Image (cartoon, rainbow, N blue to C red):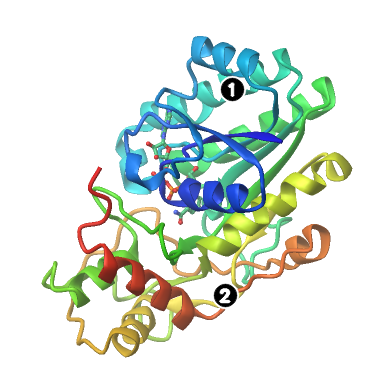
C-alpha cells in the first residue's frame, strides 16, 4: 500500500516514515528540505524533494503512484515566528494544504491523517484538555491548524474525504536512528540535552512567575514513536470514523524545571538554567486528556514515562552530537 507522507524529512515525519516502512507500507516522501534533512529519510522511501503544495508536483505524484492515503505533517510550526509573520503560516499551512486536499479529491484519495496541535486550544479553561474544550488559539500557528481542521470537515461531507486530525502536545524522544534536529531548535528537551553535551552554556527558561508550583510552564510530553503509532492506528480506522480530531498526550504535566531535573538524572550532568521574560502566547499549563484516542483509535502509548522519553533523546543526541549532517 502506497502512503504519501509530507514533511517526511522532518522530525516527526522521519519517525512516521520509519514506522510505515517497518509495517510494510511503501512511502512516497515529499519534503522541500526547508527544515528537514535528507539524512533523516530512509533510503527505501521514494523521495520527491519538492513543495507539497505545488499542484504540478501533486499531479505528477498522484498520477504516477497508486496512493491509498496521505499523512500530512509538513508545516511551518514555530509559534513565536507565526506572531510576526502570519502570512507565511497561512500560506504554507492553509493555502498549500488546500492544494494537497484538492489534488486528493481529483485523484480519489480519500484517507488523510493530519498533524494538528495542542495550539488550537489556546489558554485552556480546565486541565486535562479534552477534545470538546473551547477552541481559541492565541497564535496564527494554532489558528492555521484549526482552520484546516474545519476545512477537512466540509471536504468530508462534500467529497467523502476521511480525515483524522491528531492534536499532538509536545513531541519528544527518538528512535535509534531518527531524532530531533531543528535549526534553530526551539524545543525544550533537545536544548536541555545540548547543554548536557557541552554544546550550549545554559538552558533559557521563558517566564518564572506563571501560576504553577515552581513558576515555570507545565507541558505534556509524548514520545515520537507513540505519535507515529497513532498515525498507523488512525489510518486503519479512518474508513469507520470519517472526520474527527484526537488529542495525543501523555496526560501528565511536567514543569520546565522538572524537565531539567529529570534530564540531569538521565545524563548525570548538571544543567544550568537562565531565566528570561515570558513569551507572548505561552499558556501556563497544557496537559491533554488522550482518553478518546485510547478508546476509539486503540492507542496505547509504549513510552509514557518522561525519563524514557528523555533517555531515548539523550541516546540519539549523544550518538549524533551535530544532528543530521545533510
Ligand atoms: N514537534 C512538536 O512537538 C509538534 C507539536 C504539535 C504539532 N506538530 C506538528 O507536527 C508536524 C511535524 O512537526 P515537526 O516537529 O516534525 O516539524 P519539522 O519542521 O521537523 O518537520 C516539518 C517538515 O516539513 C517540511 N516542509 C514544510 N513546509 C513544506 C513545504 N511547503 N513543502 C515540502 N516540505 C515542507 C520541512 O522541510 C520539514 O522537514 C507539523 O505539522 C507541526 O505543526 C509538532
Q: Position of residue 228 (x, y in %)?
A: 59, 55
Other residues around mark 1 within 10 Å, as few (<14) / some (14–19) / many (≥20): many
**Left or right placement of residue 11 versus residue 231 in this view:** left
**Left or right placement of residue 300 versus residue 202 in this view:** right
Instruction: Identify which residue, 296 or 70, lies in the foreground.
Output: 70
- Mark 1, secondary structure of its residue: helix
Dot 2 or dot 1: first in sequence order is: 1
Quarter of the picture holding the C terminus? top left
Q: Position of residue 120 (x, y in %)?
A: 56, 48
Residue 135 makes an appearance in the image: no
Q: Position of residue 325 (x, y in %)?
A: 22, 48
Instruction: Identify which residue, 5 or 296, lies in the foreground.
Output: 5
Answer above or below: position of 211 versus 135. Answer: below
**Left or right placement of residue 30 versus residue 23 in this view:** left
Q: Quadrant of residue 268?
A: bottom left
Q: Which residue is mark 1?
A: 100
Answer above or below: position of 288 versus 17. Answer: below
Q: Which residue is mark 2?
A: 303
Q: Residue at x 41, y 57 (%)?
A: 178
Amino acid at each position: 500500500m502506497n502512503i504519501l507522507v509530507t514533511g517526511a524529512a522532518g522530525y516527526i515525519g522521519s519517525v512516521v516514515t520509519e514506522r510505515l516502512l517497518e509495517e510494510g507500507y511503501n512511502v512516497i516522501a515529499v519534503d522541500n528540505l526547508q527544515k528537514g534533512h535528507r539524512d533523516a529519510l530512509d533510503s527505501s522511501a521514494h523521495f520527491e524533494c519538492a513543495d507539497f503544495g505545488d499542484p504540478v508536483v501533486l499531479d505528477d505524484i498522484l498520477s504516477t503512484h497508486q496512493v491509498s492515503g496521505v499523512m500530512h505533517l509538513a508545516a511551518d510550526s514555530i509559534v513565536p515566528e507565526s506572531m510576526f509573520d502570519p502570512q507565511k503560516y497561512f500560506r504554507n499551512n492553509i493555502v498549500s494544504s488546500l492544494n494537497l486536499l484538492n489534488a486528493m479529491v481529483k485523484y480519489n484519495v480519500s484517507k488523510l491523517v493530519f498533524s494538528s496541535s495542542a495550539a488550537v486550544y489556546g489558554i485552556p479553561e480546565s486541565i486535562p484538555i479534552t477534545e470538546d474544550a473551547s477552541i481559541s488559539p492565541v497564535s496564527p500557528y494554532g489558528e492555521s491548524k484549526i482552520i484546516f481542521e474545519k476545512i477537512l470537515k466540509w471536504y468530508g461531507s462534500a467529497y467523502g474525504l476521511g480525515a483524522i486530525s491528531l492534536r499532538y502536545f509536545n513531541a519528544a524522544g527518538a528512535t535509534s536512528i531518527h531524532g530531533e534536529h531543528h535549526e534553530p531548535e526551539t524545543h525544550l528537551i533537545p536544548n536541555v540535552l545540548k547543554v548536557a553535551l557541552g554544546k550550549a552554556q545554559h538552558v533559557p527558561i521563558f517566564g518564572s512567575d506563571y501560576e504553577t508550583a515552581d513558576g515555570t510552564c507545565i507541558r505534556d510530553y509524548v514520545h515520537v514513536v507513540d505519535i507515529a503509532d497513532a498515525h498507523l492506528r488512525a489510518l486503519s480506522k479512518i474508513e469507520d470514523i470519517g472526520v474527527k480530531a484526537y488529542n495525543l498526550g501523555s496526560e501528565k504535566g511536567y514543569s520546565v524545571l522538572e524537565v531539567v531535573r529529570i534530564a540531569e538524572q538521565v545524563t548525570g550532568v548538571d544543567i544550568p538554567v537562565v531565566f528570561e521574560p515570558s513569551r507572548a502566547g505561552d499558556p501556563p499549563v497544557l496537559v491533554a486528556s488522550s482518553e478518546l484516542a485510547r478508546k476509539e483509535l486503540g492507542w496505547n502509548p509504549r513510552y509514557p514515562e518522561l525519563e524514557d522519553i528523555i533517555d531515548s533523546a539523550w541516546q540519539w543526541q549523544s550518538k549524533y552530537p551535530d544532528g543530521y549532517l545533510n
